[in-house]
Image (cartoon, grey):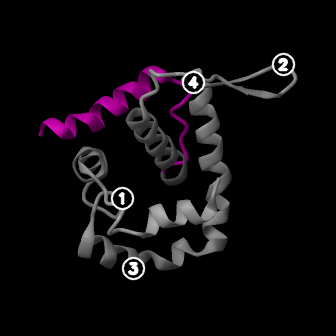
Amino acid sequence: ADVKAVRQVLTDVKTFTKGPDYTVRFAVGLGKGMVTSVGEDHRKMRGNCNRFFVKKRIDKLVPIIQKNVFRLFEDLDIVTTGPDGVRNIRKGNEDFDIMYFCHALTFRSIQMIVYNGDVSYSTQYEKEGMNTISYGQRV
């Protein structure tokens, strides 16, 4: 991944803003916190948590997020892993839902990082969790 591009997406809040997927949907399950807030509220909360977002701590989270990306790709049949361990990427998937992918990746990562839980073992549980979060758009 291009580290500079990822850093820009995560830090350039004027260009890359959180939409209602995060500010409303995730707020149903996570409350109004740093993940779901924007603007001045987010800045204040982030300031209180800066010590947790130093490179050394973030580096520890990267393998968890990467694991979630690859497992989600496999669960969505975008990437398959052969018996030799080689990953093959399926091309031309017009049905790929990037919004679902982002929601599921966020959901899985928060479950693993905050709660030390893995919901990917049960797609039914994960779908129920995603539906609960999606309920927020109808509130």
Depth order, front residue of 17/121 = 17
Q: x, y percentage for residue 131? A: 30, 29
The kind of residue on which mark 4 rests is: Asp
Q: Which mark is residue 35?
A: 1
Q: Which mark is residue 75?
A: 4
The residue shown at (25%, 59%) is: 32
Q: Tell me the magenta residue range.
A: 115-139
Question: To which residue does mark 3 refer?
Answer: 48
| Depicted 108 relative to depicted 78: above or below | below
Reading the chain from its start, which is encountered first: label 3 or label 4? Answer: 3
Question: To which residue does mark 2 refer?
Answer: 83
Q: Quadrant of the C terminus?
A: top left
Circle 2 crowding by C-alpha within 10 Å: few under 14, some 14–19, many from 20: few
Classify mark 3: helix, strand or loop. Answer: helix
The residue shown at (27%, 65%) is: 38
How many numbered tags mark residues here?
4
Q: Nearer the viewer, mark 2 or mark 3?
A: 2
Left or right of 28, for residue 93 = right
The kind of residue on which mark 2 rests is: Pro
| Depicted 125 relative to depicted 11: above or below | above
The kind of residue on which mark 3 rests is: Asn
The residue shown at (64%, 46%) is: 66
Q: Is residue 137 magenta?
A: yes
Q: Do residues under tags 2 and 1 come within 8 Å of each other at their CB atoms?
A: no
Left or right of 55, for residue 40 = left
Q: Main secondary structure of the magenta part?
A: helix
